[in-house]
Structures are given as structure tokens and as C-alpha cells.
Image (spheres, helix red, strand yellow):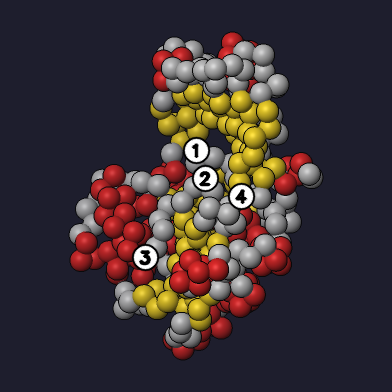
Amino acid sequence: IDAIDFTEVMVNPNPLGRPRVFYGYRGRQWYAGDHFFESHDEVKNYIQKVCEDSGRGFNEENSIVDAWLKDGSRLAAFGFKVSPTGPAFTIRKSPLVRPAMPISKLVENAMFPQLAADIFEDLLVKGHANFGVFGRTDSGKTTVVRALAEGFDPDERVMIGETSFELSFPHLPNCLNLVEVGFGDRKIITMGDINNTMLRNNPDRSIVGEIRAGEIVSASEVAEVTPGGFITTGHAGGVQELRSRFPKMFARGGMELKFDHVDNQIATMFHFLIFFGKPSDGIRTLTEFVEVKESGEYNPIITLDYDEYAKSKQRRWIYNNAISKERLNQLAFE
């Protein structure tokens, strides 16, 4: 196996023996064995060493820790009373050492059809569209954004805001990454601060790494003012789930968004919505590609044929509707 394709390593406690190790590869977790750590104390000592190198503490008072390795990989550690069976951690590989997967490879892996790839590259990227990529954890959201960014014009000014460093575009000379900064349980630099910085710096493209909660308020402003394309990711399995989450996220940002206004708010932020899922075979899959009209209506362009998958476990997509003439004309102008 080519280790460059590994995405993460997970170490879990084992009440019956030595800690177990797993690794992420091609969208699935695989068992690596229990021979890497002698004991739970060795895992705890390892976590404490990494945290110490990162200026963080791992102890009774700081039993859940996010820390960074020197190469930019992210450590999420759990121990003490919060993890009663023993310490555990996950290291997610830095994007600096994990090259982006080309769009052609995603098509080859049956993540989406060639038609979707052509639309994403020709219209979303070259047309400087505003779009969101949504799905549950490990459904391929970041993978798709990194692949599409390979088509960005190197002359563009791109600004990226994230809660953790996952997006890296070495081919873009005028690209700036900004990441939340915390000290203990307190955020010193928040996603709201980063989004406000984007508003003042007028990038050609703005990417907000993931919308989880209250940062949606400032991210919505970034979407409305970025002239050449706003991109974000988030957790939602479909349009209805996204519509349900919007008022809750705005509420966490201190702003009320009545459900009657949700569709208009989504329409001001996005031209398109892309949804991904991950079935039991571990292959990340496009489930829906939707145009958001200015009227707040949703126009499904491509959807997964669930009936076919239920019968044959084969992926087939249905081309439902054409993108509206008004949206095509706008993208052609951009």
C-alpha cells in the first residue's frame, strides 16, 4: 500500500489488552494491529510529548486536546476521566504532505460521474460560482474542494479560513491560510475574526473550511461580498437537512433566522449545493447536485439513483434538469 494515500491514524484503548491502531485509507478505516504500543501508559506518554512540543498540556484539567505536529498534522487526544477505558488519539495527516487527488481520479473511483466532473470544472470553478459541499464526517467534502482548487487561476488572490489546517494549495502563489487559534478551552482567534478579515481584504475567492455553528453569520457576509466565488463545507445530508440546520446555526451566532427566510438566506450565499454520502462499501458518493435559484427554489440537476443502488449496489446517477438559463448566463459572464 502506498502510504501517501493514508489520511489519518487512530489509536484506541483496549480494555482486554494492548491499544489498537487503525488507519484511514481510501475512505475507510483499517485495522493495523496492537503491536505499536505496549500499554495505555505508553499512549498517554506519547500524547503528552506531542502536546508538550506544541505548547499544550495533556492532564486531568486538559483531558481533550487539539494539538499540531511540526508538519502541520493535527492531533486530537482524549484521556483521563473523559476516556475511562484508556487514552486515545487521532492524527489527521497535514495537507502539506497529502497531495490533492485529481478530479479524474475521483471519477475513476466512482465518486461521481464524468458529467458532474465537467460541470464542476467548467461552471463552478471557471464560472467563479458560490457553492457549498456538504455531507457527514469523512464523506469527501475536503477531498472535493482540494481537487477543484487545482483548477483555480494562479493569478487569483485566494483566502482560506478554517478551524483546523486541512486545505493547502501550493500551486497558488497568492493564497493565504488562516486558522483558529485557541489557548486551553478559550478561542483567541475565532472563525468570526477570520471571516471579518476576509471581508476587509477583498480576495478573488474565499473559502471557509467548514460551517458548524455561529460562524455562519460572518460567513454569510463573506459569501455576499466575495466577487469571484465563495466556497464552504458543512454537515448536511440533503437540502431539507441543510434548511433545518440554518436557523440553529444562526441562533448560535446570536442572530435569529426565521424558517420562512431560510431559503432566501441560502440563495444569497450559494449558487449550487453539492451533497455526498458514504455507504457501507466505503466509497464516497455524490448523492445530489442542486442549483439554488435567486427565488429560493431548488433545482435538482444530478441525483443518485438509490433504487438502482439498492438492487445492484451499482452507482447510477439521474440527470434531472438543466441548469437555468439565468444561472448559465451569469457564470458565462464571470
Mark 1 vs 2: CB contact within 8 A: yes
Mark 3 vs 1: CB contact within 8 A: no
Say left or right for 142 vs 79: right
Image depth: mark 3 or mark 2 in front? 3
C-alpha gap between disc 3 and disc 2:
23 Å
C-alpha gap between disc 3 and disc 4:
24 Å
Kindly identify which residue carries mark 4: 27
Residue 288, given in percent of the width and then of the height, sits at 47, 69
Give the quadrant of residue 326.
bottom left
Assign a secondary structure to mark 1.
loop
Assign a secondary structure to mark 2.
strand
Query: What is the crowding at mark 2: few (fewer than 14 residues within 10 Å), some, or many (at least 20)?
Result: many
Pick whichever of labels 4 and 2 is earlier in the sequence.
Answer: 4
Residue 95, given in percent of the width and then of the height, sits at 67, 45
Q: Which residue is drawn at 49% across and 23% down?
A: 78
Amino acid type, residue under disc 3 in the picture: Val
Mark 4 vs 1: CB contact within 8 A: no
